[in-house]
Amino acid sequence: MGKVIVVTSGKGGVGKTTSSAALGAALAQNGEKVVVVDFDVGLRNLDLVMGAERRVVYDLVNVIQGEAKLTQALIRDKRVETLYLLPASQTRDKDNLTPEGVEKVIAALKKAFDWVICDSPAGIERGATLAMRHADVAIVVTNPEVSSVRDSDRIIGLLDSKTLKAENGERMEKHLLLTRYDPTRAERGDMLKVDDVLEILSIPLLGIIPESMDVLRASNLGAPVTLADEASAPSRAYFDAVRRLKGEALPVTVPGEKRGFFGKFFGRKAA
Amino acid sequence: MLTKPRPIRLKGRSFLALSLAPELPFEDWLAGLDDLAARSAGFFLRRPVVLDVDGLDIDKAELRKLVDDLSRRNVRVMGIEGARPSLLGADMPPAMSDGRPASDFEPPTESEADEAQDAPAVETIAAAGPAPAQATASLVVTEPVRSGQSLFFPEGDVTIVGSVASGAEVVAGGSIHVYGTLRGRALAGTTGNGSARIFCRKLEAELIAIDGFYLTAEDMEPDLRGQAVQVWLESNGLKTGILG
């Protein structure tokens, strides 16, 4: 049975789709069987970031409404053969996602894949709540600035109340992925510090992804950054995040800090 | 013309009322009530009474007749609990809900009943006021209160072992204790309890209020920010102090 991960944030433009693609690709590059599901019906982007926009025939809404089989809608990546994409529909809206339909699709994907990564739309409405509903693990993507942090806090509250796990009285495993971290701006004090964000959100840190032109370049190329340039700084951060996701106790490095400080965030568990 | 309009203050307040649970058939039950009234005349006199009709299969006419029958016996019904909204007309006592059980009332013996009858009305109400020697309810929350969440506990004190996020609110009938950073709103003593206080380990609050008196972040003294602080109410407004 595969693990279902929701990549969510509340706020838009923080890097959910980029991170979904990068984490999915990184897992697949490690030999795991991965499907990345785009829940952003009406405003799909994941197909572009993964370079599959010309290959979309059927989508999530078609599958939910019984117009296509799941296997017809899944798109296999051309570079990593264990990586699949289930695209969203661009022409419909989020009302076409039904709770029963989503449940059926997720259950089927869990049987066939090791990891099911749900790329949540921004906001706290239907699309976002359905994307998180069946998750086993949540990755909360946050930028080091106040509005993103507050929206993430709101999403964490929803993860603890509106998901199937929460309703069954279980605890949802949550991780913080700090993206678009700019060491020079952090030094100047223009951004929230890593410590401040962790103190406010009080969930364990999965990784810090540095702000980088490599990410933008990869997106424009239609490749997850971990595939476009494995050696780039953001790629290495995503590969490390994946190792932590699989349970490895790997110290989190703050980009731009000296090596002596690397152990600082090791094993950080917030209150 | 009013030169300085005073705002109308609305407060929640809880009182102790007798809850009467009638049984079917009403004729027999009323006969039993008459019997009790005969032994202790004036037992229901001036007492607030709530009629609990939960689980009774009755229609609107029957309920109206019961209320009339009771008022003929000098039992004034101030509210009805457990009735479907369709049973309650505009001229009926209002619906009540969420009653909390208090200690049972013993029907008085004859000597007590005489005293009760002689005692002035004020005292009867005073006796029914605060629940005798009952511990105040308290709520302990061991997780952070997240943005957008609202913690509402009019029954008593709230203790939070964690932080209250920006955009979250905690509303308590009693005091509020935050063993973490208070970034959102904290409203204590909302049921009219002016002796309630707010304590927090680190004050970054957007708004704090006790019994309707409030301070926004702008009104707070800047040197309180980031400090361990307590807030209480005095006659001329909210007072704040740094906790040693």
Image: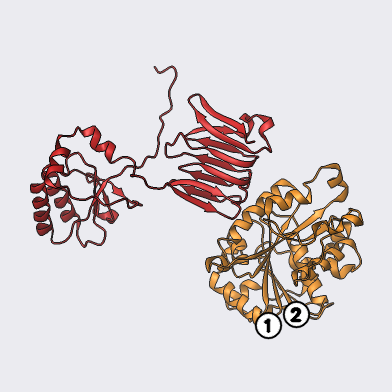
Chain colours: A orange, B red
Q: Callout 1, which amino acid? A: Ala
As drawn, the label of residue B2 is: none
B96 above or below A248? above
Residue B41 in picture, x, y percent from top left: 10, 43
Chain assignment, label 1: A
Q: CA distance from mark 1 to mark 2?
A: 8 Å
As drawn, the label of residue A112 is: 1
Left or right: residue B205 compared with residue A255:
left
The answer to whether one can see residue A157 in this image is: yes
* Residue A37 location, quadrant: bottom right
Chain assignment, label 2: A
Q: Earlier in the sequence, mark 1 or mark 2?
A: 2
Q: Given contact means CB atoms under 8 Å apart, are the residues at marks 1 and 2 in contact?
A: yes
Binning the other alpha carbons within 10 Å of mark 1 as few (below 14), some (14 to 19) or many (20 upward) gives some
A37 above or below B37? below
Residue B146 in picture, x, y percent from top left: 60, 52
* Kind of element beneath mark 2: loop
Q: Callout 2, which amino acid? A: Lys
* Kind of element beneath mark 1: helix
Q: Nearer the viewer, residue A139 or B61?
A: A139
Q: Nearer the viewer, residue A157 or A220?
A: A157
> Do tags 1 and 2 sit on the same chain?
yes
As drawn, the label of residue A33 is: 2
Residue B130 in picture, x, y percent from top left: 34, 41
Residue at horizontal 47 percent and vertical 42 percent from the top: B174
* Residue B22 location, quadrant: bottom left
